[in-house]
Image (cartoon, grey):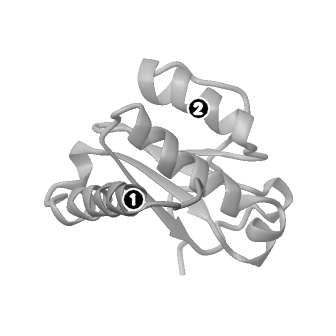
């Protein structure tokens, strides 16, 4: 994050934050947005999920990609932290493991923008938990 030194810097930062809030509040139909969920349980945070989440928030905004970035709890893939679930409009969610800032950039450029799968996908091993 850049340092705020002047009133103009502060106003610019305020406008950026208001734009992010407007985007989130105006998402009456979240299925029309790219949805990114970053696992932020203790194991994820310890593995670097905070930096990954900040990167997604900043880069999706910079690249003008309509996306909702949220944090979630444990996804159950502690061995592969940081984990990120990405849902493209009209698609099933895909979970990526071992996501670094570099991998996050690859996910944005190839999967989110182009729809091309990238390495690091954690295969789905069940559809629902039955009681």
Q: CA distance from mark 1 to mark 2?
A: 26 Å
In the rendered view, does 82 fall on the left or right side of 4? right
Callout 2 secondary element: helix
Residue extending farthest to the bottom is 131
Quadrant position of residue 115: top left
Query: Quick one: 26 or 73, which is closer to the camera?
Result: 26
Q: Residue at x 28, y 45 (%)?
A: 33
Choose the circle earlier in sequence order: 1 or 2.
1
Q: Position of residue 25 (x, y in %)?
A: 20, 66
Q: Considering the image in quadrants, where does the C terminus appear?
A: bottom right
In the rendered view, does 40 fall on the left or right side of 57? right
Question: To which residue does mark 2 refer?
Answer: 107
Q: Considering the image in quadrants, where does the N terminus appear?
A: bottom right
Q: Disc 1, disc 2: CB below 8 Å?
A: no
Quadrant position of residue 30: bottom left
Question: To which residue does mark 1 refer?
Answer: 13
What's the mark number on residue 87?
Answer: none
């Amino acid at each position: 994050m850049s340092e705020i030194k002047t009133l103009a810097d502060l106003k610019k930062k305020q406008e950026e934050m208001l734009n992010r809030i407007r985007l989130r509040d105006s998402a009456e139909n979240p299925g029309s947005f790219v949805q990114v969920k970053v696992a932020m349980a203790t194991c994820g945070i310890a593995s670097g999920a905070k930096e990954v989440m900040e990167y997604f928030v900043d880069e999706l905004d910079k690249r003008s990609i309509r996306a909702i970035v949220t944090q979630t709890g444990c996804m159950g893939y502690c061995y592969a932290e940081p984990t990120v679930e990405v849902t493209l409009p009209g698609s099933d969610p895909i979970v990526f493991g071992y996501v670094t800032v570099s991998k996050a950039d690859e996910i944005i450029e190839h999967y989110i923008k182009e729809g091309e799968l990238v390495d690091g996908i954690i295969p789905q091993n069940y559809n629902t938990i039955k009681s």
